[in-house]
Image (spheres, rainbow, N blue to C red):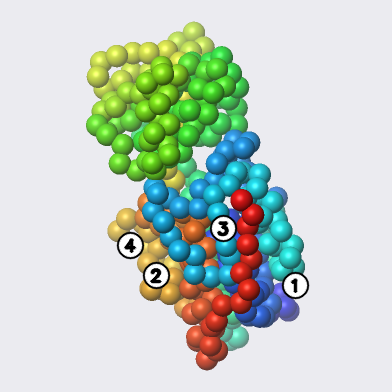
Amino acid sequence: MKNKIYDIVIIGGGPGGIGSAIEASAHNIGEILLIEKSDNHSNTIRKFYKDNKRVDKDYKGQVTTLQGNVEFYDGTKETTLDYFNNLLNSEKIDSRFNTEVEKIIRNKETDLLEIHSSSGIIQTKNTIIAIGKMGKPNKPDYKIPPSIKAQVNFNLDKCSSNEKILVVGGGNSAAEYAYDLADQNNNVTLVYRKPEFSRLNETNENLLKKYHGEEKLRVRMNTDILSLENEDGKVKVEFTDGYSVFYDRIIYAIGGTTPVDFLKSCSVTVDEDEQPIFDQHHETTAKDVYVAGDIAFKSGGSIAIALNHGYHIVNNIQRKKGKIFSHTEKFTKTE
């Protein structure tokens, strides 16, 4: 496949990657390839969202106007996945799943970007890195004893019901984990190290207050964890306020980290906070290499903004080619 030259290769099959692919196709950008390391697109939604979970267009109630060719409205996990399926199928986007990317280098002889992947070297004129952060969750700086690692999780995959569970974190994922688990007849406590929440959207903030008020779950603020221990098969948690409590399971929802090593292997410069450096067109310090979606956010993020990233990137690629960028017929999502 090395002989084929793509106009755009998109790394990552989340909203930013899908949006970029649809924009490129809508404007006849040329040969397009979408690469995803998992076995399907939208892996974060598939893996980290419970069935029928609400999927919001905007983050923290910040209303974002969609500027490109993809319409999106609030929905559920299922309607969102169906919509993205239909988009990719309708545009006949060339997709390659179960493909891991190792690095991107520029061939000095051809001036093309070469993507070194598990399926070989792929040549392209432009690359959009649209990988997320959920794949590399932040982990606590204290030791997790090996004997309890099966009971310490970073998503809800192993959760069931009738357990005493501690959810750690202060963002939207932590809040959603907490009330989802409470709905499954678990005894849930949400602990956050700060005195108040500052990153919750209005929906999650109201739900937490409702569940806490109805004693469906407990919220402990301004409290952090000192250590975890195994005591007779239970997880013993030592808190900074002097209390020790036993739990069946601990769920961490404390954000994700930018995959710095991967970015560096693509010649993308990162700042002191290990975030990729890019210009107003989302082009990084590596020429013709762009970033879109979660990896371009310092914090938070939304599907709407990720979709807009794709629009602006494709706009810039067209601008470089001297072509006028205009809207075509929008692809509409049914609520």
**Residue picked out by circle 1:** 1
Q: Amino acid at mark 3?
A: Phe
Q: Secondary structure at mark 1?
A: loop
**Residue picked out by circle 2:** 278
CB within 8 Å, label 2 to label 1: no
How far separated are the C-alphas under marks 3 and 2?
26 Å
Residue 279 placement, left or right of 2? left
- Give how far across and how far down residue 61 sits, in percent: 40, 49
- Give how far across and how far down residue 309 sits, in percent: 48, 66
User: Closest to the observer: 125 or 327?
Assistant: 327
**Residue picked out by circle 3:** 72
Earlier-in-chain disc, 3 versus 1? 1
Dot 2 surroundings within 10 Å: few (below 14), some, or many (20 or more)? some
- Quick one: quadrant of the N terminus? bottom right
CB within 8 Å, label 4 to label 3: no
Residue at 43% x, 39% y is 203
Residue 271 is marked as 4
Q: Nearer the viewer, mark 3 or mark 2?
A: 3
How far separated are the C-alphas under marks 4 and 3?
32 Å
Earlier-in-chain disc, 3 versus 2? 3
